[in-house]
Image (tube, rainbow, N blue to C red):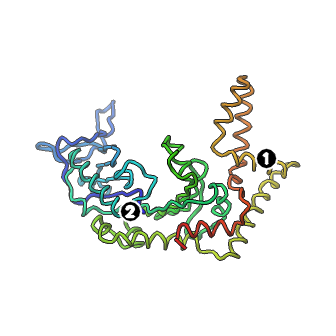
């Protein structure tokens, strides 16, 4: 159920020779003045000073920096992917047992690099609850439905890997993406994983949001009330995504396709309908443009030809962004919506 977890340590000591990289403040070569240095942790008779100190490891990432409202007081922030900290991969969301294993690994890693802490007292400052839905069809078949879902409380955007769909505000995000496509983009091995894996994430970005949504404030709360994460996740997904009736789904998806056609007609091109169908074809090739360019280079290595092709593909890609999610399934959009709903909510 968990992936990303950020902690703010409340009870910690940093060893004078801790394995942390220190970034110094700004040095003015003309005046010799150094600005932006803050006391980060005790060392000898004084302090280790700097702008920020950090550690980047496979198990966790650590940042030590001054508190914005109290520059003489340092904060120690710890970030981790819970399943990756426990077993080296973040494909499968962490359950209760994996979460406990990850927290033990992080505690040991902090001790190893010179940070002593009571991890149970750490404040939960970000938490990503998630679920992988193994779908019957490829991710592109479900995108028309997902792109049609509007939310009064969250703004909408698309980004990363050509497939990620994001609804967000300053407190939380709902993120849906092709997990296998993401792992391929990050050069991770995927041949042993299910090919159709759609990731649904509820990202709580602030400590207050975590507390208000699921009633958890600390690592101790997390371990003692782990079931509240699942309940909060399902409540958020039901409120933000899966709140439509069958009739409402049919209405909003039809409106979305109509808006796509209006977009092409508004370009003023006499061939706007043909351009629409060309863009549909380009949209189907999401993630394959580099392979196409490589194939063309093998057949015809003329630099001018490759330049023109790259320019044409870039223009077509821009047009296809609106359509990358066109239906590629013979099933109704209503059926696809309810398949995702069952997968996320267990209906």
Total numbered badges shown on the rendered structure: 2
Residue wearing tag 2: 95
Q: Residue furthest right?
A: 270
Q: Position of residue 240 (x, y in %)?
A: 55, 70
Q: Please tell me whether residue 187 is drawn above or below residue 244 in the rendered image.
A: above
Q: Residue at x 69, y 27 (%)?
A: 297
Depth order, front residue of 37/148: 148
Viewer can see residue 36: no
Q: Given contact means CB atoms under 8 Å apart, are the residues at marks 2 and 1 in contact?
A: no
Q: Quadrant of residue 343?
A: bottom right
Residue wearing tag 1: 278
Q: Dot 1: what SS?
A: helix
Viewer can see residue 92: yes
Q: Position of residue 200 (x, y in %)?
A: 52, 61
Q: Position of residue 10 (x, y in %)?
A: 24, 60
Q: Residue furthest front?
A: 192
Q: Quadrant of residue 228?
A: bottom left
């Amino acid at each position: 159920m968990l992936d990303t977890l950020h902690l703010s340590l409340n009870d910690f000591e940093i060893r004078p020779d801790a394995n942390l990289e220190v970034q110094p403040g700004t040095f003015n070569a003309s005046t010799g003045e150094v600005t932006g240095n803050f006391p980060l942790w005790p060392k000898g008779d004084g302090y280790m000073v700097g702008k920020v100190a950090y550690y980047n490891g496979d198990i966790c990432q650590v940042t030590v920096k001054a508190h914005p409202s109290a520059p003489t007081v340092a904060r120690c922030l710890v970030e981790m992917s819970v399943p990756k900290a426990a077993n080296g991969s973040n494909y499968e969301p962490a359950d209760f047992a994996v979460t406990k294993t990850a927290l033990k690994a992080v505690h040991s890693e902090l001790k190893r690099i010179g940070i002593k802490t009571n991890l149970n007292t750490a404040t939960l400052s970000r938490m990503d609850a998630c679920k992988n839905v193994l779908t019957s069809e490829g991710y592109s078949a479900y995108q028309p439905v997902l792109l049609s879902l509007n939310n009064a409380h969250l703004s909408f955007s698309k980004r990363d890997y050509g497939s990620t769909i994001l609804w967000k505000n300053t407190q939380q995000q709902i993120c849906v993406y092709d997990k296998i496509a993401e792992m391929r983009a990050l050069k991770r091995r995927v041949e042993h994983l299910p090919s159709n894996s759609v990731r649904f994430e509820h990202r709580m970005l602030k400590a207050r949001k975590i507390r208000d949504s699921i009633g958890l404030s600390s690592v101790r709360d997390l371990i003692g009330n782990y079931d509240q994460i699942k309940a909060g996740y399902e409540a958020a997904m039901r409120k933000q995504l899966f709140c439509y009736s069958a009739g409402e789904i049919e209405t909003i998806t039809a409106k979305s396709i109509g808006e796509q056609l209006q977009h092409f007609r508004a370009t003023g091109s006499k061939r706007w309908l043909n351009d629409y169908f060309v863009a549909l074809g380009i949209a189907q090739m999401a993630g394959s443009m580099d392979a196409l360019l490589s194939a063309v280079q093998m057949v015809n290595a003329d630099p001018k030809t490759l330049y023109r092709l790259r320019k044409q593909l870039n223009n077509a890609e821009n047009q296809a962004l609106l359509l990358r999610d066109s239906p590629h399934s013979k099933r109704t959009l209503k059926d696809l919506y309810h398949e995702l709903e069952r997968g996320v909510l267990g209906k």
